[in-house]
Image (tube, helix red, strand yellow):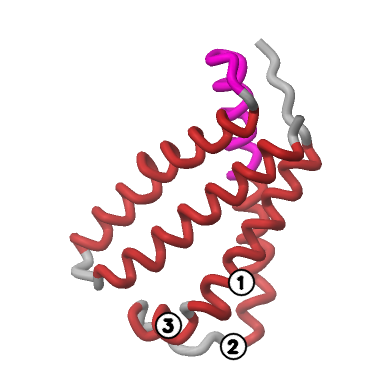
Amino acid sequence: MPFDINIFAVLGAAVAAMVVGWLWFGLIFRKLWTRLAQLDERPAAKDAVQYPIALVVNLVGAFVLAYFASASQVANQNSLLEAALYSAVFGWLAFSAGRALITTVFESRSVKLLLINTGHDLLVFVTMALVIGLVGN
């Protein structure tokens, strides 16, 4: 059964995810996150590799979210926006938040770091869902 996936919505969702990441880790939580993650300030040369990788991963994630949202829309006969938001929240809960919690426990990491990282992931999933749900029709 073919599903309609709007490539412009996928591209927009990936770009929006990059903007969310820049705001979250670059402006809002930069100092606290860097300290909690025990990271040194990254030299700009690393950015040349990290940002393209992040963009590709966000493109794949946006495409998969759009696919599941489209499938959910067909199966449940709801709006694409509703399907995308459900897919995003349940996807975050099942894959991102759960895995991050396990990693945090086994690595004895800070709960604050867990909240920063999973908060970012949730915001990215919801932002992607909003773009896909609003642009994808």
State how far apart marks 2 and 1 are (Cα): 16 Å
Depth-wise, is mark 2 or mark 3 nearer the camera? 3
Image spot of residue 118 (x, y percent): 39, 58
Image-quadrant location for residue 35: bottom left
Q: Amino acid at mark 3?
A: Thr
Q: Secondary structure at mark 2?
A: loop
State how far apart marks 3 and 1 are (Cα): 14 Å
- Answer with left or right where residue 67 lies relative to residue 34: right
Image spot of residue 24 (x, y percent): 53, 71
Q: Amino acid at mark 2?
A: Pro
- Answer with left or right where residue 63 lies relative to residue 33: right
Closer to the N terminus: mark 2 or mark 1? 1
How crowded pointer 3 is (Cα within 10 Å; few <14, some 14-19, many 20+) is rated as some
Q: Residue at x 33, y 71 (%)?
A: 113
How crowded pointer 1 is (Cα within 10 Å; few <14, some 14-19, many 20+) is rated as few
Q: Amino acid at mark 1?
A: Trp
Closer to the N terminus: mark 2 or mark 3? 3
Image spot of residue 91 (x, y percent): 44, 39
Quadrant into which the N terminus falls: top right
Q: Which residue is mark 2?
A: 43
State how far apart marks 2 and 3 are (Cα): 13 Å
Q: Secondary structure at mark 1?
A: helix
Q: Nearer the viewer, residue 59 or 70?
A: 70
Q: Which residues are magenta?
A: 61-78
Q: Residue furthest top?
A: 1
> In the rendered image of this protein, does residue 95 appear above or below residue 44?
above
Image spot of residue 30 (x, y percent): 49, 81
Count of labels in the image: 3
Q: Which mark is residue 22?
A: 1
Q: Which mark is residue 34?
A: 3
